[in-house]
Image: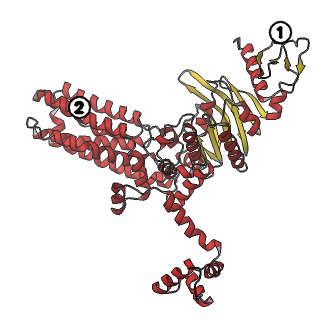
Amino acid sequence: MIASLRGVSKNYGRTRALSPMDLDLGAGVIGLLGPNGAGKSTLLRLLATAQQPTTGVITVAGHDVTGSVAERTQARRSLGYLPQEVGLPNRATAFDFLDYIAVLKEWTESQSRHLEVRRVLELVDLAERARVKITALSGGQRRRLAIAQALMGDPALVVLDEPTTGLDPEQRASLRRLLSEQARTSSVLLATHQTEDVSALCDRVIVLDRGAVCFDGTVAEFVATAAGQVWVGDEVNPGALSSWRTGTGAVRSIGGTPHPGARLVEPAVEDAYLLMRATTSTRQGVVP
Amino acid sequence: MTDTQWHAGPELLRRYAEGSLDHVGQAAVETHVSGCAECRDHASALVSPSELEPTWDRVLATVTAPPPGLLFRALARLGVRDTDIVVLRASANLVLALAIACAAAICFALVAAQLRTSQQELFYLALAPLLPAILVAGAYDSTDPLRELAEATPHSRLRVALLRTVVAVIGALPLVLGMGLVPQFEPSLAAWLLPSLALTSVLLVLLTWWPATTSVVVVATGWLVTVGLLRAGSGLDLVTAAGGQVLFAAMLTVAIVVLLARFGLLRSLGARP
C-alpha cells in the first residue's frame, strides 16, 4: 500500500469540505471524479501535504504526514504534486523552473539534478524547449511543464489535479502512456472532469460528491452500475435522468421508460457518472 | 582525411583509450582518430559504453543547463552554494515581492519626512522596526505563485525565507538607510536598528512553525501593543535608552540562538535547512 487515509475529514471554518473517509491507494492509475466543489482538490491537497486534515491520519510511503515534521518531510520525498493551477514564473526558462523545483526536492548535486531535469523534460516532450522562457510556451506546453515537475524523482505517489486540461488529443494520448508507465510502480491519483481519461487510463475510480465517497471500485464495476439503463433511439425516453442528441442524430437517454424503437446499448463511464450524479442529486432534493 | 597513410597501433590506441598518454600524445592521437574511420572503430571497441556514460552525462547536463548570468556566476565564485543560487534565481522572478518591499521603504521615508519631530519619534518607533519584518514576509511566500508546490516538497522553507530576505534587504536597505541622511532626522532615531534586527529575527524564528502571514501579524501586533503601552505610560524613551537597547540586543541574541537550534533540529529531523 502506497498511501492510506483513516477517518480523514477537512473543515474550512464551519464548512465541511470532506466527511470522514477511509481510502487505500496502491500502484495503478486511480481516477477521481466529482462535480465542482465535491472536495476533489481538498483531498488531493491533503495527500500532497499542502494542507492538514481536521481529523484522521494520512500515511504516504509508510510515513504519517499528520504526525511529526520528520515524518511529513520523509513523506514529501515520495510525493509528486500538480495543483489545479500552477502560477508558473513567466520570466524563467522551462529549465530554470524545473531546476528550482528539483532543488526543493533535494537534488543537491548539480549534474544529477540537471540530468533529472532533462529526463522529465524528455518525458513530456519539451527537451527542445528547455531554454525557452515560460511566457513563450503555449498553454499545452505550460501544462506539460507543470506535469513534468510532478514526475521528478520518480515519486511513489503522484497526485495530479486536472492534468489533461489544455492538452490537445495527441498530447492527452501521450500523457496517458506516460502515466500508465509511471503507474507500474507508483500510485497515480488524478482528479478529472474528463470521463474518457478515466475509461482510457484508470484501473480504479473514486467518485466524490459533497465531500463524501459515493463510489469506489474498478472502472468495469462503475460502468456496470449503468447496465440496462442506457438507450439510443429517435426520441428522449420519458422520465430520462439525462439525455442528449449524439453526432449521428440519435438520442442517447439514461434511465426513464424506453420509448418504442429505443435500443439498449452498452454504457460508458460518462453514462455511469451522469446516472450517479442524477440519482444522488435527486436523493438530496436537487434538480440535476 | 579519409586517405590516411598510417594507422595507430593497438598499444598506442589502448593507451589513448586509457588516457595514459602525455598531453601531446593524447592530442596527436585524438587528431588522427577524428579523421580516420578505421582507427576510430578500433578505439571505440576499446572503451565500453558504461565507461562513456559518465562523460555523456556530463555533456548532457552541460548542454541542457542555460549559462548563468553574470551576477550568479560571481556568486558562485564567491562560494555561494549551487542550490542557493538556484533559489535566488527563482526568487529574482518575484518582482512583485521586491517591488512591494522597495515601495514600502520609499513610502515610509516620504511619510516620515512630512511629520513634526515629536510625531516622527512615535512613527519611527511604531513602524520602523516592523519594516524589515514586513519585507521578510513580502519576500517570502505571500506573493509566491509556487507556494502550494513548494509546500509539498521536503526542502526547508526557512532556508528559502532567509535567502529571499537577503534579496529583499539588498533591494530595500539602501532606501531605508538613505532616510537617515535627511537633515531633520534626529541621529538618536537610528536607535530603531536594534529593535528592527530583533523583531526580524523573532519573525524568522516564528517562520519555522507558522506561515508568513500569521508570523508577521503576531510580530506586528506584539510590537504595536508594546509601543502603545509605552506611550500611554509616557515611557517611549525606554526604547531608545541604553536599558531598552540592551533589552533588544538580548532579544536579538536569544532569537539567533533559537534560530540556530531550529536549524539543527530541522537537520536532525531529516530536512536540509
Left or right: B79 as drawn, with respect to B46: left
Residue found farthest to the left = B183
Residue B157 % position (x, y): 45, 45
**Which of A10 and A94 lies nearest the eye of the viewer?**
A94
Give the letter of the chain under mark 2. B
Residue A171 % position (x, y): 65, 41
Give the letter of the chain under mark 1. A
Give the vertical position of B269 relative to A53 (above or below): below
Can I make out residue B251 in this image?
Answer: no
Looking at the image, how many numbered discs can be counted on the residues? 2
Crowding at mark 1 (Cα within 10 Å: few <14, some 14-19, many 20+)? few
* Residue tagged 1: A238
Residue B67 % position (x, y): 42, 57
Residue at (27% x, 44% y) in the render: B197
Work out how far the residue at label 2 is from the one at label 1, CA to CA, in angstroms: 69 Å
Identify the disc placed on residue B107.
Answer: 2
- Is mark 2 in CB contact (under 8 Å) with mark 1? no
Quadrant position of residue A11 = top right
Tell me the mark number nearer the camera, choosing from 2 and 1.
Answer: 1
